[in-house]
Amino acid sequence: FNENPGEYLLFFGRIHNEKGTYEAIKIAKETGMKLVIAGIIQDRNYFEEKVKPYVDGENIVYFGSAGPEERNNLLRGAYALLHPINFDEPFGLSIVEAMACGTPVIASRRGSMPEVIADGRTGFLVSGIDEAVKKVKYIDSISRRQCRLWVESKFTAERMVNG
C-alpha cells in the first residue's frame, strides 16, 4: 500500500488490442501525463503499428514484462491505472492488485469492471477515451486508503473462495 501517488499513469497487462494499450496512450497524451506500459507483447503487429511509434522513453515508456517486485513498485507508484479494455473481461487481476496498492483505476465499463471497481470510490468506469481523459482530473478525489479497504473487503482469497 502506498498513500502517496506518483506522477505517471500506468498500463499494466498484455500488449494487445483487447487490453487497450493504444487507448491508454491516447489518454495519456490527451492529459499530458507520462505513461508507463508494462506487459508482454502478445500481438507483435499491434505493438509495432499502434504502440511502438509513440514510445519515446520519456513521456511514453515501454517497461516490458514486470516480475513480482517490479509489478508491486509500478502499481503502488502510479497516479492511476488505465484499463481501457476492448472486450468483456471476466475479471482483471491487475485492477485488484492496483487497488490493493492504493492505486485508483480508470477502466472501460465492460465485462466485470462494474463489479470490480466501485465507481467514484475506487476509480472510474468510463465509456471511451474522452470520458477517461476527463476522469483523470478527478483521481485526487479518490482515497487511496479506500481502494485498499475495498480490496480487503471484497477480494481476499478466503472471501473469493467462499463466493
Image: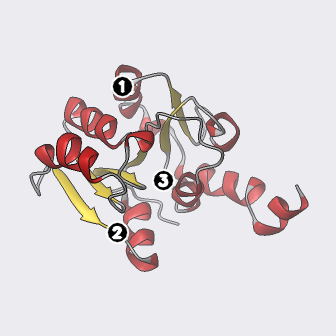
Q: Amino acid at mark 3?
A: Thr
| Callout count | 3
Q: Residues within 10 Å of mark 2 (few under 14, many from 20)?
A: some
The residue shown at (32%, 58%) is 41
Tell me which corner region of the image, top left, top right, bottom left or bottom right, holds residue 133: top left
> Mark 3 = which residue?
103
Label 3, label 1: how many angstroms apart (C-alpha)? 20 Å
> Mark 2 = which residue?
65
Q: Residues within 10 Å of mark 3 (few under 14, many from 20)?
A: many
Closer to the camera in the image, 62 or 52: 52
> Mark 1 = which residue?
129
Closer to the camera in the image, 33 or 43: 43
- Measured along the vertical axis of the image, is residue 126 above or below residue 151? above
Tell me which corner region of the image, top left, top right, bottom left or bottom right, holds residue 97: bottom right
- Measured along the vertical axis of the image, is residue 96 above or below residue 111? below
The residue shown at (22%, 40%) is 50
Q: Residues within 10 Å of mark 1 (few under 14, many from 20)?
A: some
Tell me which corner region of the image, top left, top right, bottom left or bottom right, holds residue 83: top left
> Which element carries disc 2, helix, strand or loop?
loop
Mark 3 or 2, nearer chain start: 2
The residue shown at (18%, 41%) is 49
Closer to the camera in the image, 79 or 159: 159
Q: Amino acid at mark 1?
A: Ile
Q: Amino acid at mark 2?
A: Ser
Residue 76: where, in percent of width, then height? 44, 63
> Which element carries disc 1, helix, strand or loop?
helix
Answer left or right for 34 relative to 57. Answer: right
